[in-house]
Image (cartoon, rainbow, N blue to C red):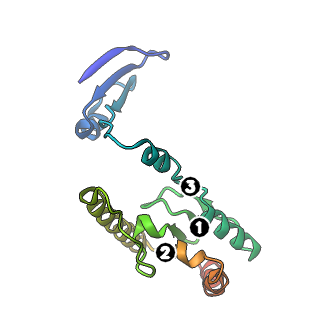
Amino acid sequence: MRVRRPGKRGAWLVSVKREHLSYMRKHARSTRCVLHATPAPVRDVAPAVRKSMKGNKGKDTKPELLVRRRLRQAGLGGYRLQWNVPGRPDIAYPGKKVCIFINGCFWHRCPVCKPSMPKTNREYWIPKFERNVERDRRNIALLEQDGWRVHVIWECQLKKKVVDETFAELIPVLESELANR
């Protein structure tokens, strides 16, 4: 653990190892302590790969914007974005306990289109994707246990050829769920 002098607001800055951070947050005595984990070591990655990965956005992606636009056109506004429940659904109607995840086929391993696996660094990617899929399953199960109705829209379901069909199925279901709860 490394402690530095008080910062601008008089708070002590404490650096701890990442694995000890949750313990320290629970047991920190002073409210004037600012805890942060030391950053993970940066791996040697090609500049092109680094640039590509930095371009992956976490919110307001094209698929999300398309779904939100279609929901507003159908008169289903009033949703919240990135609601603070397990999995942080992309779109949530908290009062009605209805949420929508808009999953990228590559990152969340779409069962419909079965995206390709990266050819390099497979020992990293295979466990990474398995963790992503397991986390998605766990979050959906937690939401359903809490009474949420969960919908998952895959990126491939938003392609020009099938987007109208996707929303023709989704909109009536959402309308009935939002009206009945």
* Above or below: residue 32 compared with residue 124: above
**Residue shown at the point (31%, 59%) measured from the top left:** 125
Q: How far across and down, in percent of the image, does residue 149 sit?
A: 50, 76
**Residue shown at the point (49%, 17%) measured from the top left:** 9
Q: Helix, strand or loop at disc 2?
A: strand
Q: Can residue 30 be seen in this view?
A: yes
Q: In this view, does 19 lie to the left or right of 79?
A: left
Dot placed on the residue nearer the N-terminal end, 2 or 1: 1
**Residue shown at the point (23%, 58%) measured from the top left:** 123
Residue position for label 2 = 150
Q: How far across and down, in percent of the image, does residue 68 sit?
A: 67, 67
Residue position for label 1 = 95
Dot placed on the residue nearer the N-terminal end, 3 or 2: 3
In the image, what residue type sits under mark 2?
Val
Q: Is residue 123 left or right of residue 155?
A: left
Q: Which of label 2 and label 1 is nearer to you?
A: 2
In the image, what residue type sits under mark 3?
Lys
Q: How far apart are marks 3 and 1 (CA)?
A: 22 Å
Q: Helix, strand or loop at disc 1?
A: loop
Q: Helix, strand or loop at disc 3?
A: loop
Q: Which of label 3 and label 1 is nearer to you?
A: 3
For the residue pair 167 and 86, the one nearer the viewer reads as 167
Q: How far across and down, in percent of the image, does residue 157 sit?
A: 56, 78
Q: Distance between the residues labelled 2 and 1?
A: 14 Å
Q: In terms of image quadrants, where is residue 67?
A: bottom right
Please identify the quadrant where the C terminus is shown. Answer: bottom right
Residue position for label 3 = 59
Q: In terms of image quadrants, where is residue 175?
A: bottom right
For the residue pair 104 and 89, the one nearer the viewer reads as 104
Q: Is residue 54 left or right of residue 145?
A: right
Dot placed on the residue nearer the N-terminal end, 3 or 1: 3
* Above or below: residue 83 compared with residue 164: above
